[in-house]
């Protein structure tokens, strides 16, 4: 793995180890619970908007796990 890519992941993991990141993810989880309700949706446009909100929030919540998986895969390719 080149130095720039390694530093990218190290910085990302450092950010994700902070209390601020944990608080952000907790807030995002609460928002997902709030937005993940179809009974309040009245129009198709509102449905698409809510779907977009949920997609972004789920991406944010899964970012740490996804980053860890990609990093391990890159590390494994280096060793092969």
Image: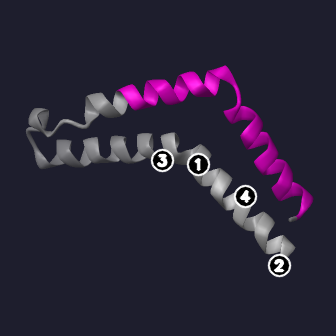
Q: Residues within 10 Å of mark 3 (few under 14, many from 20)?
A: few
Distance from disc 2 to disc 1, alpha carbons, whole Å, reads: 23 Å
The structure residue drawn at horizontal position 8% and vertical position 38%, both measured from the top left corner, is 42
Quadrant of the frame with the C terminus? bottom right
The structure residue drawn at horizontal position 67% and vertical position 52%, both measured from the top left corner, is 68
The residue wearing badge 2 is 80
The structure residue drawn at horizontal position 86% and vertical position 65%, both measured from the top left corner, is 1
Pinpoint residue 7: horizontal percent, then vertical percent: 85, 49
The residue wearing badge 4 is 71
Distance from disc 3 to disc 1, alpha carbons, whole Å, reads: 10 Å
Q: Is residue 9 above or below residue 39?
A: below
| Chief secondary structure of the magenta portion | helix
Pinpoint residue 70: horizontal percent, then vertical percent: 67, 60
Which of disc 2 and disc 3 is earlier in sequence?
A: 3
Q: Nearer the viewer, mark 4 or mark 2?
A: 2
The residue wearing badge 1 is 65
Query: Relative to the observer, which residue lies in front, 78 or 32?
Result: 78
Magenta residue check for 18: yes
Magenta residue check for 9: yes
Q: Nearer the viewer, mark 2 or mark 1?
A: 2
In the current view of this chain or complex, which residue is farthest to the right?
3
Q: Which residues are magenta?
A: 2-30
Distance from disc 4 to disc 1, alpha carbons, whole Å, reads: 10 Å
Give yes or no for contact between labels 2 and 1 (Cβ–Cβ under 8 Å): no
């Amino acid at each position: 793995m080149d130095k720039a890519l390694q530093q990218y992941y190290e910085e990302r993991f450092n950010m994700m180890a902070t209390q601020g990141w944990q608080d952000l993810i907790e807030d995002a989880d609460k928002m997902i619970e709030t937005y993940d309700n179809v009974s309040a949706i009245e129009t198709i446009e509102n449905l698409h908007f809510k779907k977009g909100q949920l997609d972004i929030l789920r991406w944010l919540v899964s970012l740490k796990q996804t980053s860890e998986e990609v990093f391990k895969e890159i590390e494994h390719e280096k060793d092969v």
